[in-house]
Image: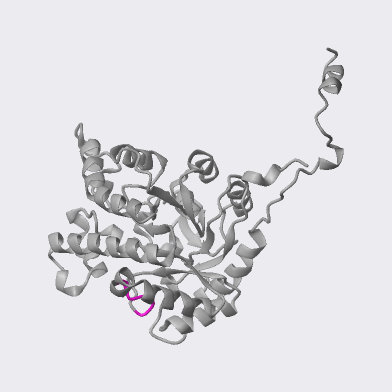
Amino acid sequence: MAKLGKNMKTVKGPGIFLAQFVDSKAPFNSLEGMCKWASDLGYKGIQIPTWESFLIDLDKAAESKTYCDELKGNINSFGLEITELSTHLQGQLVASHPAYDLMFDVFAPENLHGNVKERTKWAVDQMIDAINASNFLGISPMASFSGSLLFHTFYPWPQRPSGLVEEGFKELAKRWKPILDHADSKDVDICYEIHPGEDLHDGVTYERFLKATNNHSRAKILYDPSHFVLQQLDYLQFIDFYKDHIKMFHVKDAEFNPTGKAGVYGGYLDWKDRPGRFRSPGDGQVDFKSIFSKLSQYGFDGWAVLEWECCIKSPEQGAKEGSKFITDHIIEVTEKSFDDFAGSEIDKEQIKKILGL
């Protein structure tokens, strides 16, 4: 019997990224409350934002496997797994251009505001802690942002001076290389969300970063098609190009409807009025059937995790619908060829006769 599906994998899910649902009101203000809420909606996994201390004590998690085992056991008691840890905000602060420093200060402790050097050191330490925690939890992929030194120059006016881009990626790699090396020692992949505003915002910039890090084996990708819709990038072919690098997957929808007044850059409009805007899964233009097919075909066995950022629908409705949406799109891959019924053992003499030899 032909084993057609031996290299294909069934995507795990549904999972949900908790960051956008955190609130001061129950059930969104405690780990147990959010776990019960997610489990009741049919989710099987939660992605934890490590900057929310009521969800995870990152200092303890980095130092104590006992704490990590207890955390995992508590979450497992609700029928859930930890899909991955997220370090988006800390990763953002590993590399920040001065133009954004004031706005990015909110991602760091208040005592570090206005002190970029110490803030950057804190961010790096946080990344190391999260890597250690991921290792203790037995989870290889970890989500992050690359940060940005160059994005303010993406549209070259005035013209970029020669060597600027190369120097920018050299510095970015210099900052990330020790973190990536530590991740390698702990069997953790840092999955950069390819995202506008980051120096890693498309395939070309990801490749630049890889080259600058000497093709570091731990520099992987968090694939989120919504950001490619807003950039008008072919998000399906992206999978073909980078299938071996994609280790995480956010299920987030988007749409792009340009007008005679605004396009990709959005005219500084509010999200609901922009030509490009995020939507709940199924409400936008992303072809998730093709995405799940490609990821399954190429052997992606990570989690499909809902990231809700819709500018119209409520988070409660989005979370409720998102669980079913992901479940309905997960493909249980086949382990045999559809035409096995016509198969037979190899007969070399018969083959020669069929070929007229």
Front in this rendered view, residue 179 or 193: 179
In the rendered image of this protein, does residue 139 appear above or below residue 56? above
Measured from the top left, where is residue 115 in percent x and y?
Answer: 12, 64
Residue drawn at point x = 86 percent, y = 20 percent:
354
Measured from the top left, where is residue 177 in percent x and y?
Answer: 26, 47
Residue drawn at point x = 51 percent, y = 46 percent:
235
Measured from the top left, where is residue 79 in percent x and y?
Answer: 57, 76
Front in this rendered view, residue 224 or 184: 184
Q: Quadrant of residue 284?
A: bottom right
Which region shows up in magenta? 54-58
User: Would residue 192 appear left or right of 241 to someone viewing this image?
Assistant: left
Residue 255 visible here: yes
User: Would residue 180 appear left or right of 114 to someone viewing this image?
Assistant: right
Residue 259 visible here: no
Q: How is the image coloured?
A: one colour
* The C terminus - image quarter: top right
Front in this rendered view, residue 317 or 301: 301
Residue drawn at point x = 46 percent, y = 74 percent:
72
In the rendered image of this protein, does residue 212 appear above or below residue 100? above
Measured from the top left, where is residue 186 in percent x and y?
Answer: 35, 56
User: Would residue 291 appear left or right of 207 to someone viewing this image?
Assistant: right
Front in this rendered view, residue 242 or 256: 242
